[in-house]
Image: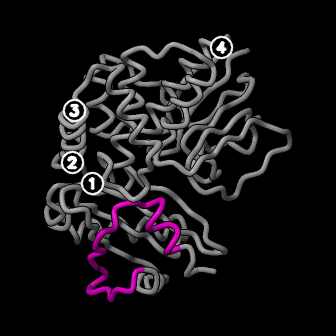
Amino acid sequence: MDKKMIFGHKNPDTDSICSALVYADLKTQLGDNVKPVRLGELNKETEYVLDYLDVKAPELITKVPEDVKGVILVDHNEFQQSVDNIRDVKILEVIDHHRISNFETNDPLYFRVEPVGCTSTILYKMYQENDKEISKTIATLMLSAIISDSLLFKSPTCTKEDVKAAKELGEIAEINVEEYGLAMLEAGTALDDKTAVELLTMDAKEFSFGESDVIIAQVNAIDTGTVFERREELEAEINKIIKEKELDLFLLVVTDIINSNSDVLAIGKATQNVEEAFKVKLAANRALLEGVVSRKKQIVTHLGDTFK
């Protein structure tokens, strides 16, 4: 197979899915033979976006087929967040906006990582650099990713570049950014039909901090209390995941998208690291992190420092 595959991380969020679709469009315009795929089920926010545009979701894969020429990673670079056989395939490119960790290749590659709030902000610049057309659909996909990652520009990860890109993409898409963004984020907070396992895995990422293995799962909600009504069930499933994956810590972050705070549930032998990182005292494994909404910029960085 001549075709190359493009995909985001496991338990994909809106940026991960949209970036794969968007970069596949740009690469196709540039004459490349690529296929966007995904490494997990869609969340409700992403479903809202794809339904709004009548765009088909990328094909689900668990492993890269042997006959694929190479892969392109978007919205991630850490191997534990990627496809199961990532170490056995040729990585051709990486387009990302996260920290660089646990990453190495045998061959040179195109590696582009920028300190912006969203991968799609980088992709928007790449369309401009290559002087390629951005359709309304592609503009809406990129705009949706930026809205998602920035929580409609409220997140501390949001940069001036993200806001500028979103404004310009909104004009191309002919969309009222605020109205569309609120509807999209609210769609993502509909959690009533989710099992405890689904809540814990729908947006979970694995991290290695030194010799410690940690999972940080994030759920956006309008009322965080409704999530913790299922606390016993959640704790039971978390303990199963800790045992199965031999984790030092599982941190569930339930983010209030209205008030920009997060209620966290920390379980594992490294819960003291959470207290140290955020200067809080866990009460029955829970604490309120005021003003904390970003896993990338506020949680991973502070928590990671305590394991050094």
Front of the two marks 2 and 4: 4
Residue 266 sits in quarter? bottom left
Does the magenta run of residues contain 286? yes
| First along the sequence among labels 3 and 1 | 3
Left or right? Give the position of 283 relative to 206.
left
| First along the sequence among labels 2 and 4 | 4
Q: Which mark is residue 189?
A: 2
Dot 1: few (<14), some (14–19), or many (≥20) neighbours within 10 Å? many
Question: Which quadrant is the C terminus positioned in?
Answer: bottom right
User: Looking at this view, is 115 or 66 the one in front?
Assistant: 115
Q: Label 4's element?
A: loop
Verify CB contact (< 8 Å) between mark 1 and mark 2: yes
The residue identified by callout 4 is 30
Q: Label 1's element?
A: strand
User: Looking at this view, is 230 or 187 the one in front?
Assistant: 187
| First along the sequence among labels 1 and 4 | 4
The residue identified by callout 1 is 220
**Residue located at (33% from left, 89% from top):** 281
* Mark 2 vs mark 3, CA separation in Å: 15 Å
| First along the sequence among labels 2 and 3 | 3
Left or right? Give the position of 294 relative to 258.
right
Q: Amino acid at mark 2?
A: Thr
